[in-house]
Every structure is written in C-alpha cells, then in structure tokens.
Image (tube, helix red, strand yellow):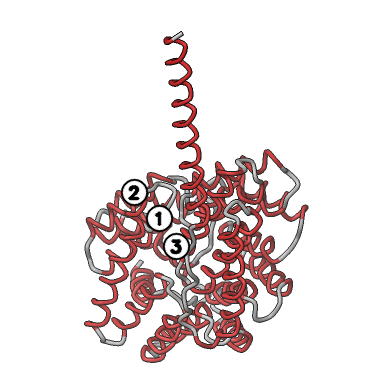
Amino acid sequence: MKKNYWYILLIAFFISAVSFVVINYKQKKDIKLSASFPLLTRKDSTSKDEWLSAKKNTDKLLAKIKANPRDTTAALALANAYIMEARINGNISYYDNAAMKQVENVLAIAPGNYEALLLKSLLQLSQHHFAEGLATARIAESINTNNAFVHGLLVDAHVEMGNYEDAVDAADKMVSARPDLRSYSRISYLREIHGDYPGAINAMELAVQAGLPGEEGTEWCRAQLGRLYEHTGNVSLATDQYQLSLAARPSYAYALAGMARLSTFKKQHDSAVYYLEQAQKASHDADIQQSLATAYLNAAQTDKATALTKEVIAQMNINTNSTDEDPTLGHYSDKELAYAYLQQNNYEKALAHALAEYNRRPKNIEINETMAWVYYQKGDFGKALPYVEEALKTHSMNPKLLCSAGLIYAKTGNAKKAKTMLGLGLRQHPVIDADLQKESELVLKNL
C-alpha cells in the first residue's frame, strides 16, 4: 500500500514537473514569437510621408503580435513590411534579420506554411546564402508548382549558383505563370549575361512599363535600364532614365548612383562626390558607400576615401561574421570585401574573401570574374586565366568583363584573343572604370 502511495506521489510530481516545463516552454516560445525590431527612421527625409505610413502599419502589426504571439498572418505581414523597408532604407542586414525572425516564428508554428517558405528563401538569397535559398525554394515548389513567385526565386537561386540552364527553365515557367515587373527584370538579366543587350534592354523597358512610377520596384528597374544603357555607351539615354527616376522618386539612391557614374565617366569628379553623398544620405547600401570612397579618391580627397573604405570593410565584416553565431543570419559579403581590399592594395585579404565566395558557388560567372581580377592585380596572370574563361562561358558582352579578359589574355601571350576581347569591350565606348578603360586602350593600341 505504501509502495503504491509512493508511485502515485512520483507520478503526480512527474506530471507537475512536465506541466511546468511545458508551460514555461510555451511562455518562452510566445515571448520569442512576439519579439520584434522597431522601424528605423529613414535617412531620406523626402519620403517622410511614406515612412510614416509604413511605421503606422508596422506598429499595428506589432500590436497584433503582442496581443497574440501566434498570429501567423500578422507575422508574415510584418516580415513583408521589413523586407520592403530593407529595399528602401538599404539597411539590409537589420531588416533581413528582423524579417527572418518573424518567418522562423511562423514556421515553428506551421512548418509547411507556403508563404513563410517563400519569404525564407527570399531572405536567404538576400543574405547571399544562395545554396540554402535554393533548397528552401525547392521545398516550396514541391508544395505548389504553379506559382510565379517561387519560379522567380528559383531563377535567382540558380543564377547565383551558376546553374544557368536551370535558371532559364525556371524563367520560362515564371513568365508562363505571370508576366510582371519582377518577371521581366529577371528575363532582362538572363539576356544580359547571355550577351543579348538589345533583348535585355527591351525586357527591362517592359518591367518599367509594368510598374507604377515612383514605386521603389519600378524605379529600381528604371535604374537598371540606365545601367544597361551605360554598358552599351548610350550616355544620354542613361541620363534620361536616372532623371526620370529622380523626378518620380526624389533622392532615389540608385538613380543618384547612376548619375555619379556618368559624372565620373565625364571626369566631373566633384559632381560624382555630390551625387554619391546624396545617395548615402538616402541609403545604407554598402555598394553606394564603397562607390563614394572611390569618388573621394578620384576627387583627391584621399583621407575621406581611406576612412570610408575602412568603415565599409568593418561593417561588412561584422555582417559576414554574424553567421558564426547563427548560420541562418548574417549577410555574406565576401565578393564585395574582395573588391574593397583590392582598393587598399591588400591582395592577400582580397584573395581570401574571393576564395571564400568561390568555394560556395564555383560555377557563378561573377565570382569567377572576381577571382580572375584578384589574381590579375596580384600579378598571377596564369592563375587568372582559367577563372576568366569560366566567367566568359555564357558569352556575356559585359564591357568590364571583356576588357578584364582582354588584359589577362594579353598578359598570358594570347594576342589574338586579347585584341578581340578588348575590341569588343571598348567598341561602344561604355561607361566603365577609368583606370580599366585607360589600361585597355593602351594595351589594345600596342597589340
């Protein structure tokens, strides 16, 4: 009888302990689910009304989640709001992490939630976790194969991983499901990297036409259209696109950056600094800051260039290293760091970061171009050659790539290929880096 009593007491104690653990776990989980990131004030004061509207929306969603931490609809809406703010604000690391927290919380409640899987893949791609983004997109595709958004994610992921045939297949499915701004812009990039600039321009024009003037997505496409005109030497048409973008969305960072490139091309270095300083006020984008550092250098403001480059490198390293603590977070910036270290003539660190990115996606043409250029700058021309040939495999007509390839061929004794590549790269007088243009013209003249 006494033995049975102790069994009953132990069982009661066990049930109480389990109940405490379950309740405690649920409380902790609910606290995690309700965790949020505040909307940061935008650097660009011209979009104050838009920001106030966005803040009102996010505050409303935060209140819903606080009242019910298991409200997955509000969590997904908040994740989408963070993602949009990242595009506008340029603080990718902060808002991607904020959005990913909400997405992971939803998946903890509903592991097969389709929208959460789509957003998770989108965020992984944004953070340059390309292999993971591809894997997540494939899971989403297995749930619903008739969705243009998932096929768009697959296009992006396959492109970044260097699976170009798979990217084209996914693009066909994407356009069949829903031709829209995002579809046309992806088609444009695929045409560009396969050497079809007229087709790329046409597709990006369709993307711009499919959007509403002034919206961030539309103006991003318009800025990309301007960049395509730069590559084909149409400076006046590029200028038109950037000015149209700034009229529709004042202080738009990527249009200002485009105007800065055109100013640099015209050797108007003070104007380039002005445009990029305005762009920096509007966006936290690291590429814009690095471009500003280069502009400072061109304008003989060496101290500012050095200080800003150090600042950009430090911030990119922080974002990249955050993956050591949590592999689902952090923004891989190794390709960007490689070019930043090249600007400091720190070839060993440039190579280390280029290799880190190459090891993640060895088939991607852009990272092969990066590897080739780092080795070229180091003077290891023989090592540069196989990488630049891999970068040329899609028959891209990008003038920067063609000129880089021509210089590498010249240094490795292939004068015929060097002449062909340099001729193609310079033929349309594209907007490219002044030092690259000068060196390419000199080498071509002496071949």
Q: Residue at image x 47%, y 21%? A: 11
Q: Nearer the viewer, residue 164 or 71?
A: 71
- Quadrant of the drawing holding the C terminus: bottom left
Q: Nearer the viewer, residue 210 or 320?
A: 320
Residue that numbered label 3 is attached to: 401
Q: Nearer the viewer, residue 152 or 263?
A: 152
On residue 325, which mark appears?
Answer: 2
Give the Cα distance between marks 1 and 2. Answer: 9 Å
Could you say where residue 296 lies in the image, as x and y percent from the top left? 31, 83
Q: Secondary structure at mark 1?
A: loop
Give the Cα distance between marks 1 and 3. Answer: 29 Å
Evaluate whether residue 409 shows in this view: no
Q: In the rendered view, would you say 148 is above or below 90?
A: above
Q: Secondary structure at mark 3?
A: helix
Q: Residues within 10 Å of mark 3 (few under 14, many from 20)?
A: many
Q: Disc 3 residue type?
A: Leu
Q: Residues within 10 Å of mark 1 (few under 14, many from 20)?
A: many
Q: Secondary structure at mark 2?
A: loop
Give the Cα distance between marks 2 and 3. Answer: 36 Å
Residue that numbered label 1 is attached to: 330
